Amino acid sequence: MPPKGWRKAAHDPVATQTLVLDNGAYTLKAGFASAAAAPTYDDCKIIPNCIAKGRDKRVYIASDLDKCTNFGEMAFRRPVERGFIVNWEAEKAIWEHEFSEGKEGLRCDPKETNLVLAEAPNCPVQLQKNCDEMVFEEFEFATYYRSIGPALNAYNDIPSLFSDSAPPDTSPLPPECLLLIDSSYSHTTITPLYNGRPIHLAIRRMSVGGKLLTNYLKELSSTRHINMLDETYLLNEIKEAVSFVSPSFKTDLERTWKGGLSDRREVDPSIVLDYVLPNYEHSAHGFARPHDPIKARRKLLQPLDGPREDILPVGNERFAVPELLFTPTDIGLQEAGLPEAIMQSLSVLPAALQAGMLANIVVVGGNSLIKGFMERLETDLRQLTPTNIPLRIARAPDPIKHTWLGGARLAHDRDLLRGVVVTRAQYQEHGSTWLGRWFAGGDALKGK
Amino acid sequence: MPHIEILPNTGAAPAPGWAYVPDTGYDPSKVAFNPKDRKRQAARLGGMPTGLELSARQLTAVQRRIAELERDNDARSGIEIPNKKTTFKTSATKKILLSAKEIRHWLDDEDALYTNKTQAPGGGARAITSRVIKPAMGAKGRRATITPRALTPAVPAFPGSTSGLQDKALEIRSAVPAPLDDEKLQALLAAPPLPYAAARVGPPGAGAPPQRLFCDTCGYWGRVKCLKCGARVCGLECKGKHDQSMCTRF
Ligand SMILES: [Zn+2]
Ligand SMILES: [Zn+2]
């Protein structure tokens, strides 16, 4: 038998290579997939999805930032807001920089390339239309499939996430039930999928994502210690380095309190840290070390000419910040925390599906890497579910690239790919309104 | 206009600028509210935190803070694209590329669209409540950063979405769930995506613990309330710092 896709090679509108793009607000996850080789995480590149301007007025586009060593007061322009591509002027500059003008790696000719694009759920229809028009009219991709990110995850090998003994599954057929939690930069979303099809009425979104957590840490550090309002990059770095989800918030809050005037307490040195800030002359990144009250006090006595050390003390901020994923009301945000949000989503489903979903929860997105996140989620969720219901929760091995990998596995299977993409000729014939309806009404398995 | 009720303060007695307050962070009895008290219930659904008594000014402050935390692009960005091209392949992409609309504009457009739909004659459905407290905003006005969306979960006017969910216990509690009804399942799978506002997670259920309050100065429990501005602090030491530099009542 000839390889798939061979037959019509001469007139096949579906190109050989596919650019799979998870277009996140913070980073692009991008890489090529083809029928030739099964994709792996290594085929995915992470690229900052921003245009940044440093203190020295130098402008960096997307992957240029990899060469940057001075992030002081760096300002960012992000084309994606609330998870959706809003500013196409900036996004186009970034896509062109990475895909059309890029020297190596992801350079491609869109006319010879299929595009599989992941979008966030519940995107306003007008923004989807803008996206479709840009893809076909400005970039002129050969074929195109736009899908919500959670649905692409269904093409991943789900059974092996739950069991070490399960043989690796190369078939991209989706499991019957999948509850996909995506806690990333813009928000945290909950998507139940049945045979790979998202159940739209049950998709729920929390406003808390990595962006809100970084901004919160920035706010707390600025009101309590040093003004860091222009140091988004640094605060994100600190958040990633020191934050953890507390298994017992109240206990940890006690352990980090200095006590009252009349009952001084020792703060727990295993939690309270000093974060040594980078000065961007000798160091591009900071680091954390145990809190040293003497050094912290000596700060003011440091010589003006010698190397100075600026310290940001971090105590309860380490766990009070990611706590917002579980208790958004801590900042007055009237939303349920993640475990209860999951139950809100499930309550839309028929009873017969609820148990199946609870036994197949997969977590993706960068926030799931915060220490203690998975443990807390499981503990809290267990308390909300009847004990006779099995609960299985797994985090993807690489939660940041996992959505991309699902899309790449779809693109690797030419028959599946052919079933979902729309060609440029079809778009030119039917227009963008038709295309929007096709993607909205269609699911990944349409036509199968 | 938002329905904002100024509720009496618990410790109204004149005090030296601060008062110990009942710790709403712990007491489960504070969760309960009188279900017959419609006004309070409405206020609560409109974004008033459970068991908290916030003045209109405090509520605005909370909204502004959340809007600030949700901000995607910082105000000072204004970064121009180097070597910007000014050619466009089609009129459609020209319009898209020159658009200066931000996400809040797109979401407002979507809200308006669905509000009109649900207010169609005979529909009888509610408007999305978040629109009700929308401040008048100019396209470029400063106030526009305070989106009501930040605080108020929209009550979606869609069947099967969050509306009314809080009372519904998971059906899963029955040991043997009803078998899957294929017709119902197909209808569920065929349902189109919800608009952005309707997919937002609802507030915590009635059984959830009340909102916790923290010291503005150090992050420990906010056991003491500043009578000038309503902020919480943990004790006299932090109250001193608060008075020096953080008290917003001026
Ligand atoms: Zn304090
Ligand atoms: Zn005050």
Image: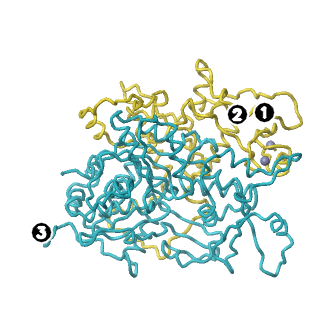
Chain colours: A cyan, B yellow
* Most foreground residue, A160 or B187: A160
Picture quadrant where residue A20 is located:
bottom left
Q: Residue furthest front?
A: A165
Q: Is residue B29 above or below residue A58?
A: above
Left or right placement of residue A125 versus residue B250 in this view: left
Q: CA distance from mark 3 to mark 2?
A: 70 Å
Picture quadrant where residue B74 is located:
bottom right
Q: Of helix, strand and loop, which one carries label 2? A: loop
Q: Of helix, strand and loop, which one carries label 1? A: loop
Look at the image and tell me whether residue A111 can be seen: no
Look at the image and tell me whether residue B56 can be seen: yes
Report the residue marked by disc 2. Answer: B24
Residue type at the position of mark 2: Thr
Asked if disc 2 is less than 8 Å from ligand 1, the answer is no
Report the residue marked by disc 3. Answer: A8
Q: Is residue A359 above or below residue A41?
A: above
Report the residue marked by disc 1. Answer: B21
The reply to whether dot 1 and dot 2 touch (C-beta < 8 Å) is yes
Q: Of helix, strand and loop, which one carries label 3? A: loop
Judged by depth in the image, the label closer to the viewer, 1 or 3, is 1
